[in-house]
Amino acid sequence: MIIRRLDELRALVTGWKRSGEVVGVVPTMGALHAGHLSLVSGAKAGADRVIVTIFVNPRQFNNPDDLANYPRTEFEDAKKLEPYGVDVIYVPDPDQIYPQGFATTVTVEGLTDILCGAFRPGHFDGVTTVVPKLFLQTGADRAWFGEKDYQQLQVVRRMARDLDIPIEVVGCETVREADGLALSSRNLLLSDEARAVAPTLSRIMRDMAGALGQGGSMAELTPGAITALTDAGFDKVEYLELRAADGLALLDTADRSARLLAAAWIGGVRLIDNIPV
Ligand code: PAF
């Protein structure tokens, strides 16, 4: 069932909650792929009722062209969700999220100044403004997010904790193509040529993670990795950093549970990826 108005959604969720059912939400911007569907499977297993939200949130796009080009595939998305038997697909009309006169921005400090936050000003403010609205509108007890957007997952967890939103945020492993490319709605924008080169990012990151696991340092490994990426056809590497898995402190060696994270441009498309070290 597709619902577009908050009052309708609330009426339904109120009934579920009265019956003591656990409500799960999978927030998305649509253009669903197997990565999203793995979150939906997780939610089906971990909640009595599942709501998938689809809302292309204008406030998290720092680049107007990126917003204009973002794939919008509601009909196909609904078809993909059919086999999962979700209870509601919530596709809020824009005024249900940002009514006339909307004047609030939620900012998580610190965690958002680094990595993607340093290159996409305002992006995480957009995320941390819309996500609590989706949490509160759906009244969900649990929410599923992909580790593909690892920084987003950490930021959303911090936001929910800081604002005392009673929700459990569940992170799920990145789903990849057979050649290693992390699934992303943006992969649809890659030309054939760029698509052929794109998996180099995860391959080089895997090699680096292996070397870091053997005691290697970012200072030694990063220059060669960046050259290999640009030689392969990437236009620019925005960042390639090792960070503590919890709290995202910058590391040179994997002296604790860590994450290697990267963002790079190819053929006008920005790809991000991360792997545990
Ligand atoms: O990861 C996404 O698709 C978006 O950032 C989210 C969490 C749905 C918020 O708009």
Image: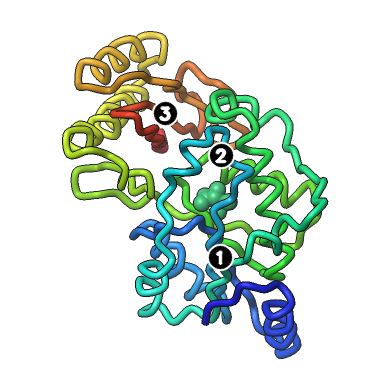
Residue 233 horizontal/vertical position (percent): 22, 22
Q: Where's residue 38, x and y in %?
A: 39, 63
Using the numbered discs, state the Cα–Cα distance from disc 2 to disc 3 in whole angstroms. 16 Å
Q: Nearer the viewer, mark 1 or mark 2?
A: 2
Q: Residue at x 53, y 33 (%)?
A: 63
Separation of marks 3 and 1 at Cα, in angstroms: 26 Å
Q: Is residue 168 above or below residue 202?
A: below
For mark 2, does the 10 Å Cα neighbourhood hold few (<14), some (14 to 19), or many (20 or more) residues? many
Residue topped by disc 1: 53
Q: Which residue occupies 29% across, 30% down?
A: 201
Q: Secondary structure at mark 3?
A: strand
The numbered disc on residue 263 is: 3
Residue 232 is left or right of residue 269, and the answer is left
**Picture coordinates of residue 178, whole percent (x, y):** 19, 49
Mark 1, ligand 1, within 8 Å: the answer is yes
The picture places residue 245, in percent across and down from the top left corner, at 53, 36
Depth check, mark 2 against mark 3: the one in front is 2
Q: Callout 2: helix, strand or loop?
A: loop
Q: Amino acid at mark 2?
A: Phe
Based on the displayed image, in which of its 4 quarters is residue 204 positioned?
top left
Give the mark nearest the N terminus, 1 or 2. Answer: 1
Q: Return the mark for residue 61.
A: 2
**The C terminus sits in image quarter:** top left
